[in-house]
Image: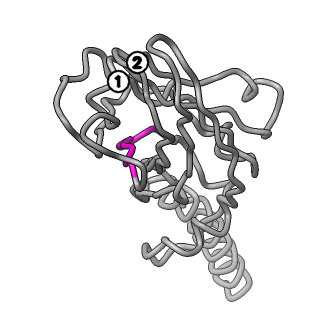
Amino acid sequence: MKKITTFLLITGSLIFISSTFTSCNKIKSLISPVDLILTSKDIPIAIPPSAAGQQVATSTIQFNLADEINNQNTSGYPLGISNLKSATVNAVSIDIVSGASTTNNFANFLDGGVLLISDANANTQQKATLGEVLGNPDVYSTHLDIPISGTTDLTEYLKGTNFTYTYAYNLRRPITSALQCVIHVKYNLKMQP
């Protein structure tokens, strides 16, 4: 009788332990995703004097996503690039930081869009449109909020380390002196601990 009781106790303990580990995996998969709002480094971009019409300006920056996740993670869970499930654009804007005047500012710009490529892999060499403004008002401004274009998942792009941002624009009037600008991009990262 004692052998049967010991056998049942050991068998029951093993079943309990194995179901506990299985349940831990189930619980882990039920943990809510963690949202991080990640602001890219300032992206300096120079807009040279140019005639009315379509123009482009580009800037390449280095950015380490793993470091930024560690810096901004307040969830209490250890997170890394492998936990990144999706990345979308939260906000895009551009500011003129020097060179603006009453005749050289965002009133000169009819349309504009911010595009991204990265060195993560061959697919990320294709430009992704982050946002674009159409029919910008003809009023003095040194700040431009750029409406987000869709919900493109940029996860693969953000796994690179070199990012080339392009500001493609259409001038309604010429720019007669250089404008030094900074593009700001905020990303919404969905992380699964």
Label 1 is placed on what type of residue?
Answer: Phe
Label 2 is placed on what type of residue?
Answer: Leu
For residue 147, side relative to residue 62 (left or right): left
- How far across and down, in percent of the image, does residue 46 sit? 56, 43
Residue 89 painted magenta: yes
Residue 186 is at least partly visible in this image: no
Residue 73 is at least partly visible in this image: yes
Tell me if label 1 and label 2 are in contact, CB under 8 Å: yes
Asked whether 155 or 25 is in front, the reply is 155
- How far across and down, in percent of the image, does residue 103 sit? 29, 34
The residue lying furthest to the bottom in this view is: 2
- Determine crowd level at label 2: few under 14, some 14-19, many 20+ residues with C-alpha closer than 10 A: some
Q: Which contiguous range is marked in magenta?
A: 88-96
Label 1, secondary structure: give it: strand
- How far across and down, in percent of the image, does residue 12 sit? 61, 72
The residue positioned 49% from the left and 72% from the top of the image is 73
Task: Looking at the image, tell me whether mark 1 or mark 2 is earlier in sequence order.
Answer: 1
* 150 lies above or below 153: above
- How far across and down, in percent of the image, does residue 158 sit? 64, 45
Q: Which residue is mark 2?
A: 171
Instruction: Name the quadrant containing residue 148.
Output: top left
Q: Quadrant of the N terminus?
A: bottom right
For residue 6, side relative to residue 36 (left or right): right
Residue 17 painted magenta: no
Asked whether 34 or 91 is in front, the reply is 91
For residue 3, side relative to residue 183 (left or right): right
Residue 109: mark: 1
Q: Quadrant of the C terminus?
A: bottom right
Asked whether 117 or 31 is in front, the reply is 117
